[in-house]
Amino acid sequence: MTVPVLPEAQLRFDALLRAVEENQYDAFIAPGNPTFQKGITRETFASVSGKVAPLLKAGYEVLYLGQMEKAGHDIYLWRIKYADSGDDTLAHLALREGLVGGFWLT
């Protein structure tokens, strides 16, 4: 069964993942709420981007898994499968009133 994703959530996800791949801190924090923007330092972002960007640049596929609600946010989940056949990543995107409240890659 294919689960439809809210277009706004997909656009946010694509933009955030692209920012990670291209190591673009300002583009990454731009769609976030003030807490998100203050909570992610350039150093933390650069560390994550440095680890994940090479995997993304080598190629990947994304599968939308679904949506849930938690702490007043809509949480959207995607599976990222890398072309290198290594471990997959679970991406979590938290949105509230159109702003990013969180983005995690686990």
Image (tube, grey):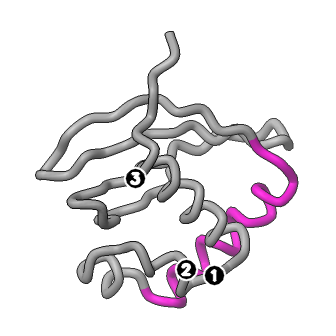
Which residue does the numbered mark 2 point to in the structure image?
27
Coordinates of residue 71 in the picture (x, y in percent): 12, 51
Q: Which of the 4 image quadrants contains residue 43?
A: bottom right
Which residue does the numbered mark 3 point to in the structure image?
93
Q: What kind of residue is marked 2?
A: Ala
Q: Which residue is drawn at 59% across and 71% down?
A: 48
Q: Are circles 3 and 1 on residues that touch, CB within 8 Å?
A: no
Q: Is residue 93 left or right of residue 52?
A: left
Q: What kind of residue is marked 1?
A: Gln
Q: Distance between the residues labelled 3 and 2?
A: 15 Å
Q: In this picture, is 56 found above or below 62?
A: below
Q: Nearer the viewer, residue 3 or 58?
A: 3
Q: Is residue 51 magenta?
A: yes
Within-10-Å neighbours for mark 2: few <14, some 14–19, many 20+: some
* SS for callout 1: loop
Q: In this picture, is 77 found above or below 22?
A: above
Q: Nearer the viewer, residue 5 or 21?
A: 5
Q: Which of the 4 image quadrants contains residue 18?
A: bottom right
Coordinates of residue 83 in the picture (x, y in percent): 84, 41
Q: In this picture, is 100 found above or below 8?
A: below
* SS for callout 3: strand
Q: In this picture, is 41 found above or below 47?
A: below
Q: Are circles 2 and 1 on residues that touch, CB within 8 Å?
A: yes
Residue extending furthest front? Answer: 7
Q: Does the magenta stretch include residue 9?
A: no
Within-10-Å neighbours for mark 3: few <14, some 14–19, many 20+: many
Q: Which mark is residue 24?
A: 1
Within-10-Å neighbours for mark 1: few <14, some 14–19, many 20+: some
Region rendered in magenta: 41-60
Q: Residue at x 87, y 54 (%)?
A: 58
Coordinates of residue 17 in the picture (x, y in percent): 60, 60
